[in-house]
Amino acid sequence: MAATSATVETTLKNLVAGNPKPDQEALRSALVSAGIPKANVEVSVSRTPTGLDVDALEAAALTGGSCVVGQIRDGGVLVTVLPVLATGKCFVGDAR
């Protein structure tokens, strides 16, 4: 899990260095390119239903019984580890 946390943090920091507001697909692609299996990556939406940018973009990497969750807000990155939900996913809802 420590390796996945480091990978998520490094990947998100590198991504925001080039673009402080990446979109959903850029974030997903960066994590998959960093070696996290696509099936284990969940990414929140990057635009609201009315077409506005979201305040924060989040991604999660499922690893064992934990979720490594990374958040991008105002060009900054925060990473934390949370338990997997009863659904076996990291996020509630259908935005994967």
Image: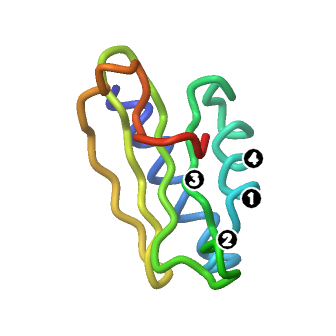
Circles 1 and 3: CB distance less than 8 Å?
no
- Gap in Å between the C-alphas at discs 1 and 2? 6 Å
Amino acid type of the residue tagged 3 in the rendering:
Thr
Question: Residue 59 in the image: x percent, y percent?
Answer: 50, 49
- Gap in Å between the C-alphas at discs 4 and 3? 10 Å
Circles 1 and 2: CB distance less than 8 Å?
yes
Amino acid type of the residue tagged 4 in the rendering:
Ser
Q: Earlier in the sequence, mark 3 or mark 2?
A: 3
Near mark 3 (Cα within 10 A), the count class, few <14, some 14-19 or many ≥20, is many
Question: Which of the labelled discs sits on residue 22, or is there none?
Answer: 2
Disc nearest the viewer among 3 and 2: 2
Q: Secondary structure at mark 1?
A: helix
Question: Which of the labelled discs sits on residue 87, or is there none?
Answer: none
Quadrant in the picture for the C terminus:
top right
Report which residue position mark 3 lands on. 11
Q: Is residue 7 left or right of residue 17?
A: left
Residue farthest to the front, as pictured: 50
- Gap in Å between the C-alphas at discs 1 and 4? 5 Å
Residue occupying the point 37% across, 14% down: 64
- Gap in Å between the C-alphas at discs 4 and 2? 11 Å
Residue occupying the point 54% across, 77% down: 54
Question: Residue 38 in the image: x percent, y percent?
Answer: 69, 28
Report which residue position mark 4 lands on. 29
Q: Secondary structure at mark 4?
A: helix
Residue farthest to the top, as pictured: 64
Disc nearest the viewer among 1 and 3: 1
Question: Residue 15 in the image: x percent, y percent?
Answer: 64, 65
Report which residue position mark 1 lands on. 26
Circles 1 and 4: CB distance less than 8 Å?
yes
- Which corner quadrant of the image does residue 50 belong to? bottom right
Q: Does residue 76 sit above or below 95 in this rendering?
A: below
